Amino acid sequence: MVNTLRIATFNIHKGFSHFNARFSLHQQRELLRNLHADVLFLQEVQDNHKGHSKRFSGWPMAGQVEFLADSIWPQFSYGKNSAYPDGHHGNALLSKFNISSTNNIDISAHPTEQRGMLHCSIELPGWDVPLHAICVHLGLFAHWRRQQLGRVADYIDAHVPANSPLIIAGDFNDWSSRAGRTFASRLHLKEVFEQYAGKSARSFPSWLPLLRLDRIYVRGFEIKQVEVHAGARFVTVSDHAILTATLLKQ
């Protein structure tokens, strides 16, 4: 029976470093592998781009999701949020355990900015109920984020049983934390860094984090450890840091 779960959330910036200065998908994959996470919550995964596939020799022909998952995370799901003539990007969930169902929901608050939430049910050995894992990427404006979090909360109320373990992680763009606190209170969630360290994590920019944009919310878990993976090396990786948490099922 699996009691301890290690998870990570990371905005991969479509496989590029800050300002798209460097194609960094291969470096990102190595960093993610070294985390030894059971479940990955990824945002801005560009699973297809015709122009980039011709320009960059290391561009994965099968798509970024399959490339990142490789043999480490045999189960994965992709939720396309934004489509354009050359390709598309969205959220992805990678798992070492069986994903039994998946649902991608459009939570865009404005036509100019496509956002989504990806919900997966994951079957873990010895658990009598599935893990509900939700990956989100919210809007840049506060009133859009409030709308989006309201829709996510409505969805969870309708589709996730109160007794089921729940993890919601991703890029919330919520530097003030106001919307997140209302969201957490409504659903009886704990933000893992607030619970463990007293404050949500600084995650942006990744090489010298100042803003608290990324979050991990949980229900039905104790928090054993949290960590922000950031620093000078991330200049060539992504504009967001990686957040990890080790959780114990209650």
Image (tube, rainbow, N blue to C red):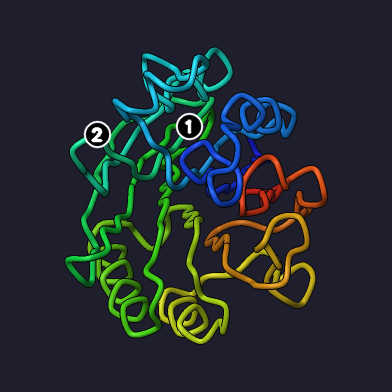
Q: Earlier in the sequence, mark 1 or mark 2?
A: 2
The image shows residue 3, relative to residue 143, as above or below, that is: above
The image shows residue 200, relative to residue 30, as above or below, that is: below
Q: Position of residue 250 (x, y in %)?
A: 62, 54
| x 52%, y 82%: residue | 181
Element type where label 2 sits in the image: loop
Q: Are marks 1 and 2 in contact (CB under 8 Å)?
A: no
Task: Name the quadrant containing residue 120.
Answer: top left
Q: Work out how far the residue at label 1 is from the one at label 2, CA to CA, in angstroms.
A: 24 Å
The image shows residue 8, relative to residue 26, as above or below, that is: below
> Could you tell me if residue 224 is visible in this image?
no
Q: Position of residue 48 (x, y in %)?
A: 31, 29
Task: Name the quadrant containing residue 46.
Answer: top left
> Residue tagged by mark 2?
86
Element type where label 1 sits in the image: strand
Instruction: Count neighbours of disc 1 (C-alpha within 10 A) and say few if under 14, some if 14 to 19, many if 20 or more.
Output: many
Horizontal side of 108 relative to 30 (left or right) equals: left
| x 77%, y 51%: residue | 230
Horizontal side of 86 relative to 29 (left or right) equals: left
> Residue tagged by mark 1?
94
Q: Position of residue 163 (x, y in %)?
A: 42, 58
The disc placed on residue 84 is none
